[in-house]
Image (cartoon, helix red, strand yellow):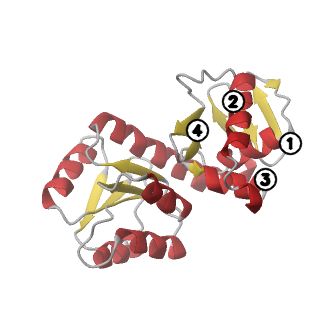
Amino acid sequence: MSAERPCILIVDDEFQIRRFLRISLASQGHDVIEAATGGEGLVRAIGDQPDLVLLDLGLPDIDGFEVLQAIRSQSGVPVMVVSVRASEREKVACLDAGASDYVTKPFGIQEFLARVRAALRSRGATVASGPARPLSIGGLSVDLETRRITLNDEPVRLTPREFSVLTRLAEHPGRVITQTQLLREIWGPVHERDTHYLRIVISRLRQKLGDDPEQPRLIQTEAGVGYRLSAPD
């Protein structure tokens, strides 16, 4: 990825949408490439090695969900789904399949651009730092190698479950991790529907990290879908 001009691939069959996104992204200093079909999008996602893929689901040749699965099987590039499909089921399925984010059309351009920046920061941190470098978000530091959590340079005491949830989110900063994923991986498959377990742990984490539950800056909620840890500084 170029530090100055990240490359973003838009996969959408509607010319006007591609044009709108191209102009908006170019205004932020991004290089933009485009594809109007799922087949072309898959080829460009693998061959051109963009820094981020914006993927529509309603493509004329291949359903976007299949394109997502194919990209994820061959590449770690962040994929942000941008779709009119707004059901919770669609969002969870895409996020579980490896999408970095899910944006429903129509959307506010400023929020959209903020999500793009978060996805690019997340990608940059993963490529540049590897596992040895602590994740820094505001005053919070998460060191996955030493398993040390600090807030404003002071150690934070967490229960094993709190630690597991926070570090799981920290492994993919800026990306939504679904409730199902967290419950399955931390509590076990039999607890996939016990979302109240997760809500309690998230509430306690926010309290210990001084994160306002009404306007959280660290652990953000995607209603009915999951949680994300803010991208690193």
Q: Position of residue 188 (x, y in %)?
A: 78, 58
Look at label 1 and name its amino acid.
Answer: Pro
In screen coordinates, is 128 left or right of 68?
right
Per the image, the residue denoted by label 1 is 160
Per the image, the residue denoted by label 4 is 232
Q: Look at the numbered disc 3 and give the secondary structure of its residue.
A: helix
Vertical comparison of 143 with 129: above or below: above
Residues at marks 3 and 1 touching, judged by CB atoms closer than 8 Å: no
Vertical comparison of 5 with 150: above or below: below
Nearer-the-camera pick, 35 or 200: 200
Q: CA distance from mark 3 to mark 1?
A: 11 Å
Q: CA distance from mark 4 to mark 3?
A: 27 Å
Disc 1 crowd, CA 10 A, few/some/many (<14, 14-19, 20+)? few
Vertical comparison of 131 with 220: above or below: below
Q: Is residue 14 visible?
A: yes
Q: In the image, which is nearer the foreground, mark 2 or mark 1? A: 2
Q: Is residue 233 visible?
A: no
Q: Quadrant of the N terminus?
A: bottom left
Per the image, the residue denoted by label 3 is 187
Residues at marks 1 and 4 touching, judged by CB atoms closer than 8 Å: no
Q: CA distance from mark 2 to mark 1?
A: 15 Å
Sequence order check: which comes first, mark 4 or mark 2?
A: 2
Sequence order check: which comes first, mark 3 or mark 1?
A: 1
Q: Position of residue 20 (x, y in %)?
A: 18, 49
Sequence order check: which comes first, mark 1 or mark 4?
A: 1
Look at label 3 and name its amino acid.
Answer: Trp
In screen coordinates, is 103 left or right of 96?
left
Disc 4 crowd, CA 10 A, few/some/many (<14, 14-19, 20+)? many
Look at label 2 and name its amino acid.
Answer: Ser
Per the image, the residue denoted by label 2 is 203
Q: Residue sitting at 47 percent across and 48 percent down? A: 119
